[in-house]
Amino acid sequence: MSDAKQTVRQVEEAWARNDVAALDSLIAQDLNSHDTIPGMPGGLAGAKAAHAMFQSAFPDRKVSIDKVFGDGDLVCVQTTVKGTNTGSFMGGPPTGRPIDITSISIYRVSGDKVVEHWGLNDATTLMAQLGLMPAPGAGAPA
């Protein structure tokens, strides 16, 4: 496995186990993140805030790293997150509903640090699984 792929795998594993110290050692402080959530700061501070919000809303979450592939300094990762919504998420009350979400992230690594991140988290599927909006092609939430 290339050094860049190993760095990204370590980042994903640190997110999964909520190891902020490991993240600080693996991610550049001036991270350029292209998947910010409205109302949250950009960069590493925004990534940490989004992670803390998700951790709080789905404390039992389990993350699997499904695929890691890439070339040179660009690495793509597919992960799956499963858990139960037992905390507030995006201002909404806990639903008690299970989730099963696949995400795709692309990282740019420089040296031994992640310097750039793009993410595609299936927010539509997540909101439908929480009953906050209908699934594509479905009726109103239950």
Image (cartoon, rainbow, N blue to C red):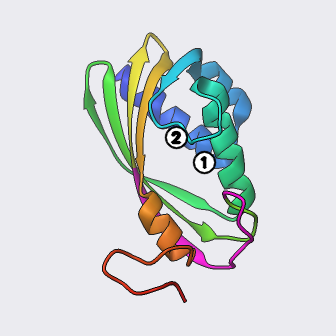
Type of the residue with mark 2: Glu
Q: Which residue lies at the image location 61% right of the left edge and 68% below the top edge?
A: 83
Name the residue tied to disc 1.
Answer: 16
Q: Per the image, is 97 magenta? A: yes
Left of 1 or right of it: where is 134?
Answer: right
Quick one: label 1, few (<14), some, or many (20+) residues within 10 Å? some
Foreground residue among 124 and 21: 124
Q: Which residue lies at the image location 63% right of the left edge and 32% below the top edge?
A: 46
Q: Check the image and report above or below for 99 versus 67.
A: below
| Magenta region, residue range | 90-103
Secondary structure category for the residue under label 1? helix
Q: Is residue 1 visible?
A: no
Left of 48 or right of it: where is 26?
Answer: left
Q: How many angstroms separate mark 1 from mark 2 (CA)?
A: 6 Å
Position in image of residue 10 (x %, y %): 52, 33
Q: Which mark is residue 103?
A: none
Name the residue tied to disc 2.
Answer: 12
Position in image of residue 117 (x %, y %): 44, 29
Residue found at the far top of this picture: 111
Type of the residue with mark 1: Ala
Q: Which residue lies at the image location 65% right of the left edge and 53% below the top edge?
A: 54
Position in image of residue 100 (x %, y %): 48, 69
Q: Quadrant of the N terminus?
A: top left
Quick one: label 2, few (<14), some, or many (20+) residues within 10 Å? many
Secondary structure category for the residue under label 2? helix
Mark 1 and 2 residues: CB-CB less than 8 Å, in contact?
yes
Left of 70 or right of it: where is 111?
Answer: right
Q: Check the image and report above or below for 100 versus 36.
A: below
